[in-house]
Structure formats: C-alpha cells, structure tokens
Image (spheres, rainbow, N blue to C red):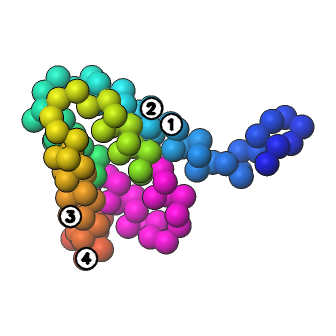
Amino acid sequence: MMNKKGINFLDSWAEFFFLVMLIIGFVVSVAIGSAFFSYVVIFLFGGMAGRFLNYRKIAFPFYLVVVGLLIGYVIGSRYGNWRVNLFCFVAGVAISWYLHGKRILK
C-alpha cells in the first residue's frame, strides 16, 4: 500500500472518496437551517446516490462512498430526526434506482 511517495492512490481511492463525501455531507447538513430542508436535501442526495449506484451495481467501493455521504450528513444534522433522514435517503435511493432501472429517467 505504501510506495516511495506515500500511499498509493489506486489502492485506496475508495477510502479517500469515503472521507471526502463524509466531509461534504457534514458541511452541507450543518449549513441547512431547518428540518424540512434537511429532509429535502437528504432525499435529493439519495436520488443522486440511487442513480450512481444503478450504473455501478456490483462494485462494493461505490457503496462505501455513498455510505460516507450518509454518515457525514447524519452526524452533522442539527435539525430533524436521524431516523427520518435515513428514511428519506433510502426512499430517494429506492425511487431513483427504480426509475433509472426502468429507463424512465436517463
């Protein structure tokens, strides 16, 4: 995993993007000022994640990156319930996955 210049990026890209998405999710959730907008944003994040995962169906590292976004968002969420945030995210992923799988959305 280490080479002369440090960590080899090709071996640890999933962990790097997990951390990046964790930070992005945290910053976005801290910046939101109400529970309603928090639920809307996490639903939209779920929709984007559903599209992303629909095109990358089997590879585990892509699921790790999406989980990083979810964990960062839930940790930073000051408004609303974490269970409702989780439900909105899963609903967004499921709806987007279904619509992209049926080719209703492209």
Classify residue 100 by image quadrant.
bottom left
> Separation of disc 2 and disc 4 at Cα?
32 Å
Which residue is outermost to the left? Answer: 36
Quadrant of the image containing the C terminus: bottom left
Tag 3: residue type?
A: Ile
**Image position of 100 (left or right of 79):** right
Q: CA distance from mark 3 to mark 2?
A: 25 Å
Which numbered mark, 3 or 2, is in the foreground of this view? 2
Mark on residue 23? 2
Provide residue 60's location: percent of width, then percent of height.
52, 64
- The vertical placement of 20 against 99, above or below, is above
Assess whether mark 2 and mark 3 are in contact (beta carbons under 8 angstroms).
no
Q: Which residue is mark 4?
A: 102
Q: Which residues are magenta?
A: 47-65
**Cα–Cα gap, marks 4 and 3:** 11 Å
Instruction: Name the residue: 59% across, 46% down.
Output: 15
Residue 103 shows in this picture: no
- Of 68 and 53, the residue lying toward us: 68
Q: Which residue is mark 3?
A: 95
The picture places residue 99, in percent across and down from the top left corner, at 23, 69
Mark earlier in primary sequence (1, 3): 1
> Badge 4, how many Cα within 10 Å: few under 14, some, many 20+?
few
Circles 1 and 3 in contact, beta carbons < 8 Å: no
Left or right, 41 with respect to 17, comes to: left
Amino acid type, residue under disc 1 in the picture: Val
Label 2–label 1 contact, CB within 8 A: yes
